[in-house]
Image (cartoon, grey):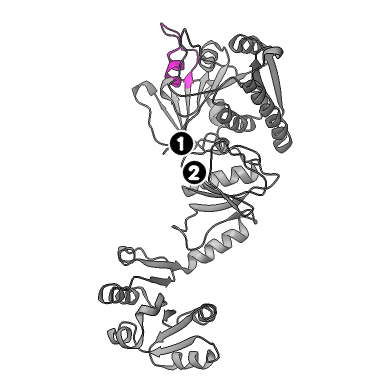
């Protein structure tokens, strides 16, 4: 088997030496001084042969080169000549093997795709290499020659000091970003939402370049990015006042939209919705029902209890992992103290599930305090979750955080703790939905 190199452009001598180490190489170049100099310089390379002539000459491919033994053609010719050669090989000779075009810059040409020509752009390669050296500091690697080369694919190493260490994949989910594979030593692991990340794991991550950068900053440096992981815009739903300005100042939102959300909430790029938590209706606050029934992004029911110095987090929810990951970001942005409340049965009647949640919360609090320096405490109470949480709220807290499943509400025969807390709370309430980030 052999590899054909067309043209004696820049880098050809070095590439010829590399390729000749594992395959026979045929170099095609027009007769002239350039070719004679190359032959003289590379005469000692084994597996190298030179054919004088034009790459667009049909006789060269039919009489001088055995195409059935060629596994790749690498072109250092100009764009137009490369396309002409590719058409000859694909259409006249039915060549189905690899054709590579080494370009000074990435061409925007549909014909390259139609002719199945792989493009290796020198600036793209240099850019990726420099990005790896200067930006990632050994923790992130950006692939060369894969995808669009715009930063939509990366591999990140999780160190022992990474905020992502020991978290479940469900706690790292971000809109328009996916963890495609996990490399743990020599093993390849397919992602599962309940899988815990370990120090030393390498994550292969894909997604929109801007969102992917947010994800990398989060897992490497622990930079809080709430609510950008959901979307870059905030929606202010018919609510005004000092608390709105306070929230706008603290949150990482790139654009705020002010409208009545009951007239229609935009579906794209919304990261958080601000709602009036004091609004009254015939059946109570309609904004609570609106949030639980319609919103798949975080929302704040504003009730004037700012600044958010002390946040009370209700751990009595099926959406706990989503809640904790997001409220942690929120607390760091507002420089708040966190108090996680878990209300259980009495000690003698603790269920297996309650014990498991309690143990995981203890580990979470310990690791979070160690990794971030955040003031965080775990509080355990016994009894009714709604009653005990409301009773505790009468103290020093400024904000209540609850997690919920969109569409689920409380029924007379099936009370839903997050909904009842949001409805009865006299504090500003942060609502975090558990979603799958399909789009």
Comparing 376 with 239, the one in front is: 376
In three-dimensional space, the C-alpha distance between marks 2 and 1, rounded to whole angstroms, equals: 9 Å
Which residue is pictured at 38% across the width and 27% down the height? 265
In the image, 340: left or right of 407?
right
- Helix, strand, or loop for circle 1? loop
In the image, 161: left or right of 399?
right
Q: Give the percent coordinates (x, y) of residue 198.
A: 65, 44
Q: Is residue 433 above or below residue 15?
A: above
Q: Which residue is mark 1?
A: 437
Regarding residue 260, the answer to whether it shows in the image is no
Q: Which residue is mark 2?
A: 177
Q: Give the percent coordinates (x, y) of residue 240.
A: 48, 20
Q: Quadrant of the C terminus?
A: top left
Q: Give the percent coordinates (x, y) of residue 159.
A: 68, 48
- Helix, strand, or loop for circle 2? strand
Regarding residue 386, the answer to whether it shows in the image is yes
- Quick one: label 2 or label 1, which is nearer the N terminus? 2
Magenta-highlighted residues: 275-292
Q: Give the percent coordinates (x, y) of residue 178.
A: 49, 44
In the image, 270: left or right of 65?
right
Q: Is residue 291 magenta?
A: yes
Contact, mark 2 vs mark 1 (Cβ under 8 Å):
yes
Q: In the rendered image, which quarter is residue 87 located in?
A: bottom left
- Label ID, residue 335: none
Comparing 249 with 232, the one in front is: 232
Density class for disc 2 (Cα within 10 Å; few <14, some 14-19, many ≥20) is many
Q: Residue furthest toward the left?
A: 92
Q: Is residue 228 above or below residue 387?
A: below
Which residue is pictured at 34% across the width and 23% down the height? 263
Which residue is pictured at 43% across the width and 16% down the height? 289
Which residue is pictured at 48% across the width and 86% down the height? 48
Q: Is residue 118 magenta?
A: no
């Amino acid at each position: 088997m052999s590899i054909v190199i067309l043209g004696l452009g820049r880098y050809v001598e070095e590439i010829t030496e590399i390729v000749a180490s594992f395959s026979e190489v045929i170099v095609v170049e027009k007769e002239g001084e350039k070719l004679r100099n190359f032959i003289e310089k590379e005469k000692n390379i084994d597996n190298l042969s030179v054919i004088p002539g034009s790459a667009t000459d049909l006789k060269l491919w039919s009489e001088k080169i055995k195409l059935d033994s060629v596994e790749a053609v690498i072109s250092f010719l100009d764009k137009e000549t490369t396309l002409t050669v590719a058409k000859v090989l694909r259409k006249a000779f039915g060549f189905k093997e690899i054709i590579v075009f080494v370009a000074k810059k990435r061409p925007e040409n549909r014909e390259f795709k139609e002719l199945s020509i792989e493009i290796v752009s020198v600036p793209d390669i240099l850019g990726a290499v420099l990005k790896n050296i200067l930006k990632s500091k050994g923790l992130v690697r950006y692939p060369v020659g894969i995808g669009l080369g715009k930063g939509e694919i990366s591999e990140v190493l999780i160190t022992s000091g990474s905020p992502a260490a020991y978290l479940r994949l469900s706690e790292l989910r971000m809109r328009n970003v996916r963890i495609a594979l996990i490399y743990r030593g020599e093993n390849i692991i397919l992602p599962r939402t309940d899988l815990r990340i370990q120090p030393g794991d390498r994550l292969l991550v894909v997604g929109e370049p801007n969102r992917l950068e947010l994800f990398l900053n989060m897992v490497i440096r622990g930079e809080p990015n709430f609510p950008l992981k959901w979307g870059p815009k905030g929606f202010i739903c018919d609510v005004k006042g000092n608390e709105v300005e306070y929230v706008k100042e603290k949150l990482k939102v790139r654009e705020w939209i002010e409208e009545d959300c009951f007239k229609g909430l935009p579906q794209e790029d919304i990261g958080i919705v601000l709602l009036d938590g004091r609004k009254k209706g015939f059946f109570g606050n309609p904004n609570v029902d609106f949030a639980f029934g319609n919103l798949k992004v975080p929302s704040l029911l504003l009730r004037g209890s700012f600044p958010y110095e002390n946040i009370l987090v209700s751990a009595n929810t099926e959406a706990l992992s989503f809640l904790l990951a997001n409220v942690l970001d929120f607390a760091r942005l507002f420089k708040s103290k966190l108090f996680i409340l878990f209300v259980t049965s009495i000690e003698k009647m603790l269920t297996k599930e309650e014990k498991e949640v309690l143990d995981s919360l203890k580990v979470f609090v310990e690791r979070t305090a160690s990794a971030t320096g955040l003031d965080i405490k775990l509080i355990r109470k016994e009894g009714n979750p709604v009653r005990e949480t409301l009773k505790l709220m009468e103290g020093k807290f400024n904000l209540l955080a609850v997690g919920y499943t969109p569409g689920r509400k409380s029924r007379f025969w099936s009370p839903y703790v997050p909904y009842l807390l949001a409805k009865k709370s006299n504090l500003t309430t942060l609502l975090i939905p558990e979603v799958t980030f399909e789009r």
